[in-house]
Amino acid sequence: MNTNDLRKRLAIYKYDRSNNASGTPIESFKFYKYTWGSLRIISGDLSQDPAPGTVPMTQVEIIIRHDPQVDYNCKVVYDNNSYRIHYIEQIVPKAFLRLRCYVYNEEQPGNRIE
């Protein structure tokens, strides 16, 4: 893996569950950090505009620098698309992570960004 291949600026959000002042649980994604990475479409297509309320089933491979805080409770946002992580692999120990992700509709309940 060559660091020159990490050319896309990705935003990583972490799942957060907290309580508001009245004690009601609030579930949301909160911004964690920006990182440089590469993104490759494995299957599906992001170029077609789906019907309202749907997202085409698209799987992508994202490679980023190793970060122990990136886990399955995170999502990656790039170019107005949200990607949920379903597999994490260390390419080189403590150097790079390969994230297998799928596109999902962040407008669904529980997926909002704050």
Image (tube, rainbow, N blue to C red):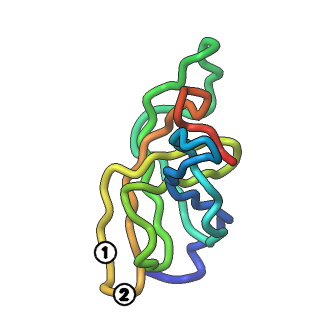
Please, what is the three-letter code of the amino acid marked with disc 2?
A: Lys
CA distance separating discs 1 and 2: 7 Å
Instruction: Determine the residue positioned at 62% across, 38% down.
Output: 112
Q: Position of residue 83 (x, y in %)?
A: 51, 46
Residue position for label 2 = 94
Residue position for label 1 = 90
Using residue 93 as the reference point, say whether residue 67 is left or right of it: right
Instruction: Determine the residue positioned at 54% across, 39% down.
Output: 24
Q: Is residue 94 above or below residue 44?
A: below
Q: Are marks 1 and 2 in contact (CB under 8 Å)?
A: yes
Q: Position of residue 88 (x, y in %)?
A: 32, 62
| Secondary-structure class at tag 2 | loop
Image quadrant of residue 36? bottom right
Q: Nearer the viewer, residue 7 or 20?
A: 20
- Residue count near mark 2 (Cα–Cα under 10 Å), binned few <14, some 14–19, many ≥20: few
Q: Is residue 80 above or below residue 1?
A: above
- In the picture, the disc for residue 26 is none
Q: Nearer the viewer, residue 108 or 95?
A: 108
